[in-house]
Image (cartoon, rainbow, N blue to C red):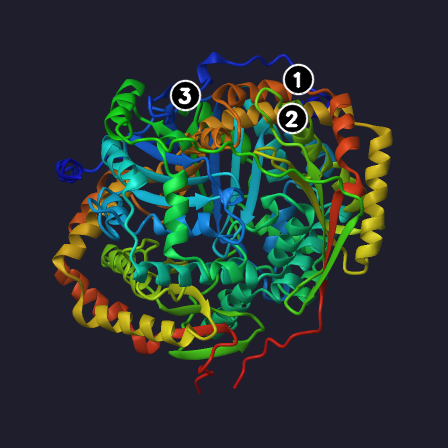
Amino acid sequence: MKTIRAGLLALITFTASAQAEIAIQPVTSPGGINAWLVEESAFPFTALEIRFRGGMSIDPVEQRGVINLMTALIDDGAGDLDAESFANARDALAAKFNFDASDDNISVSARFLTEDRDEAIDLLRLALTEPRFDADAIERARGQVLSRIQSDQKDPDTIAGDLLDRMAFGTHPYGSSGMGTAQSVAALTRADLQAAFGSAMSRDNIYVAATGDINAEDLGILLDKLLGDLPATSAPAPERADWALEGGITVVDFPSPLSIVYFEQQGMKRSDPDFFTAYIINEIMGGGRFSARLMTEVREKRGLTYGIGSYLVPQNHAEILLGMFASGNDTTAEAIDLVKAEWAKMADNGISEEELAMIKTYLTGSFPLQFDGNAQIARILVDIQMDDLPLDYVQTRNAKIEAVTTDDIARVAKQLLQPENLHFMVVGQPEGLSTTP
Amino acid sequence: MLHKLIVPVVFGLWPYNAAFAQNVTTFTLENGLEAVVIEDHRAPVVTHMLWYRTGSADEPEGKSGIAHYLEHLMFKGTEAVPGGQFSATVEEQGGADNAFTNYDYTGYFQRVASDRLELMMTMEADRMRGLILSEDNIETERDVIIEERAQRVDSLPSELLSEQSRAAQYLNHRYGVPIIGWKHEIETLTRDDALEFYRTFYAPNNAVLVVAGDVDPDAVKAMAEAHYGPIAPTPDLAPRQRPSEPPQMAERRLIMADARVGEPNFTRTYLAAERNGGAQDTAAALTILAKILGGSDTSVLARALQVGDDAKAVWTNVYYEGLALDATEFSIVATPRPDVSLAELEAALDEVIATFLVDGIDQNAFERIKRQLRADEIYASDSASGLADKYGSALTSGLTVADVQAWPEVLQAVTPEDVLIAAREVLDRNQAVTGWLIQDDEIETEVSP
C-alpha cells in the first residue's frame, strides 16, 4: 500500500492543464457569410452547425408554438420532394439533418460524408429555402406536438418548470412554453407556418461553424450555395423580460412517492464583467460533482437525493440561476432548508483559497475535454460566436478563470446569492410544506 | 439536378477505406486482465475504462440491486485513496469520472488529459481489491439508491410498466429483475452482501481494460503491467451460465392504470436472439429489421400507422439491442391518436406486421438502411469514448474483438430474405409481452394553499 501512496503523490504533482489545441479559421464566403472552421481530415465527413437567433421567443402573441411547429416541418418535404421522397433522398446519402427550436434560437445541425457533400448540401438548401408545409405533414407534426403537450400536463418536471416561468416572466414569451397550448397549436394555419419560416431564418441573424473534412475555400462556396438565398432580415426580437418571481415556496399537489423541486432566482448576464466569478461560484455550489457543496450536503452526507445541481442560464432577454433535485416526500423540507443554508453560507463567507485553487484546476483542466468530436466542436464554436466572444476565446478562457480571486468571489457571492429571493417550486406531496403567501 | 437524388444511387460500390479503420491494439496480462487500446491522436485526451464481466444478472437471488449498490460504494475509498478522494483527485486533474451498471456488466471510467492516464490506472487498480466500507457509508448510500429508484422508476408509470413487462418476459432468467433492484430487497442489502459480491467478481480475470485516446499502446501495456499486473485473480471463477427461458405457452398481457399517465401507450416486447461470438447473423438481421419497421418517418410502421386520415398512431418506434449475454428483447412502442383506442391501435399494428411478413421488404429501403449503417461507422469513429463503450460492452457481453470488428461486414452481408426469416421467427405474439398503459382518474395539479 505504501508504494501506491508514494506513487500517487508523485503523480499528483502534475498541474499544468492540457491545452485545447484546435485551430479556428475565420471564413467569409464570397457572398459575405461569416463562419468559423476547424479543419480535421481524419474522418471523411463534415459537421455543420447553423443557428438563427430569435427562436420560439419571436412567436406572434396569438400564434404561440408556431416557430416550434415550423421547425419540426422544415425537412418534411421541400421543393419538388414530398416528405417521404425527401427523407429517402437524405437517407440514401446517409446524411444527418437535425432541426431544433429553443427559446432563443433555431439550430440546424448537419453531418454529411465528403463523397456526397454536394448532393447533401443541395438537399439541405432545398429544406432551408423551399419547405413545402404540405397539409398531411402539418397534421402529422401537429398531432405529435399536441400529444407531447398532453403528456407534459402530467410530467412533474414540466409542471414545475412551466409554473416557475409563468411566475417569473408573466406574459413575456419566456413566461409560457414555446410548444404552445393545445388551443394555440390547433389554430395554427399553413399561412402562419410560412410566415414564421420567412421571419425566423435570415442572413442577419445567422451564426455558422463547420468542423471536419472541408477547407476554407470549399466551405465559402458551400455556404453561399446553402444560405445565399435566405431573406436578408428577420422578425424583431422581443423586449427584455422583467423579473417578477419573489422568494418563497409553491407546492403543487401531485401523487408521487417523491417531490420534484426546482429552485430559482435571478442570474447574471453573460456580458457582465463578473460572469466568470459567478460561474465559479455556481460550480462550487451546484456543479454536477460529488465535491460541490449541494451534492456533499444533500446527497453524500445525508442521502436525501440521487442528484442535485444548479445552473447559471444567461438567456437573450433574461438571466436565471436555476437548481433542481428530487427527494422523498418526507425529506424534501429538510433538503430545501439545506439549500437555503448553503446559499446563505456562501453569500456571507465566500470560499476558501483551497476551494478556489481546486475548482480552478478542475475548470481549466476539463475545458479541453469538451472538444470531443466534430459535431461537438462545431456546436461550441457557434456558442462562442453567439455569446459575442472573440476568436481567441478558446485560448484565453483559462486565463480568465485563473484571474478570479477569493475577494472577487466574496464580493460577487454577496450580490448573486440571495437566499431570501429563492423560490422553491415543489411538485409532489411533501410533508410539512405549503405554499407561502 | 435534384431529381437524381430520388433515383436510387449506385449501391454497394463503397468499399471500406483503410484510412478510417479504427486503430485498435489488444493484449492480455498473465493474471487474465484483457485490454483494448484505441488510438485517436486528434486531441491530448484519454478515456480510461475498467469493465467487470458482472452485472445485475449475476446477482444471487434475494439480493437484487447489489451490483448497482456496489458500484456506488466503489467511490467510498481505500487505504491509499480514502473516502471521497477518488473523484476529488480526478477533479483536481481536470477530469470527469463516473460509473454504470447493466445486466451483464459494471463499468468505471475517467476522462482526463492523456498525461494523467497512469494516475487513473493506479487508482482504479487500487480499488479493484482495496475497497474499505464503513457502516455509516453503507446506510447513507443505501438511502441514495432508494432515492435514485424513486426518481427513475417509482415516480414514472411508464418505467413501472416496463419493469413489470420484463418480469413477465423473463420467467426464469435474471434479466427479469430490474438492474436497480426491487425496492424491498434494496432495503435489506448489507455491507457483507456488498463485500462478498465485490471479493468474488472484482478481479483481473473478470475485467476488461479499455483505453481510448491520445496514447501509445506499448506505453499503456507497460502501465497496465505495473498497476493491474500484480493483482491476484479470483481462482475458479464460475462460468456465467444463467438459467434459460422455458417455452412460452401463453400470451402475456399487462394493463397498468395510473393517475400520472399523460396519455395512453402501447408496448410489445418479443423475446429475441442476441449477438453471439462467431454467430452474429441473426442479430444482424434483427438489427436491420428494427430499422425497416420503425425509427424513422419512412419506416413500415410509420407509413402504415402515422400517415393519412385513418392514421392510428401519433408515434411508433422499434428497438432492438443485440448486445447481451443471453436472449434479449425486440420491442415495438406506439402512442395512439387521441380518438383511437389501444385495442384499435394494436389490431392495426398486428395487421401491418402480418402484411409485412407476406409482402416482404422494399429493396430500395433495404439498401438505404445498409448505406446508413456504413456511414454510421464513420460518424461513430469521431468519438473515441464512444468506441471505448462499444468494445467494453461487447467484451463483457460474450463477444470478442474479432466479433466487434466483423460486425459491420456481418450487417452488410444480410439479405432481405434473412430479415424476413428473422422477422417470422421473432414477431410471434405467443412469444411476447404486450403492455397497455392507460390513464386513471384525472388528477389535480392545482397549487395547494
Q: How far apart are marks 1 and 3 (CA)?
A: 27 Å
Q: What residue type is labelled 3?
A: Ala
Within 10 Å of the Cα at label 2, are there few (<14), some (14-19), or many (20+) other Cα atoms?
Answer: many
Q: Mark 2 lies on which chain?
A: B
Dot 2 and dot 1 within a common chain:
yes
The N terminus of chain A: image quadrant: top left
Q: Which residue is drawn at 60% across and 36% down?
A: B321
Q: Mark 1 points at which residue?
A: B413
In the picture, measured across the screen, residue B418 lies left or right of residue B89, that is: right
Q: Which chain carries label 1?
A: B
* Disc 3 element: loop
Q: Mark 2 points at which residue?
A: B284
Q: How far apart are marks 2 and 1 (CA)?
A: 9 Å
- Residue A375 % position (x, y): 45, 35
Quadrant location of residue B356?
top right
Q: Which residue is drawn at 61% across and 67% down?
A: A154
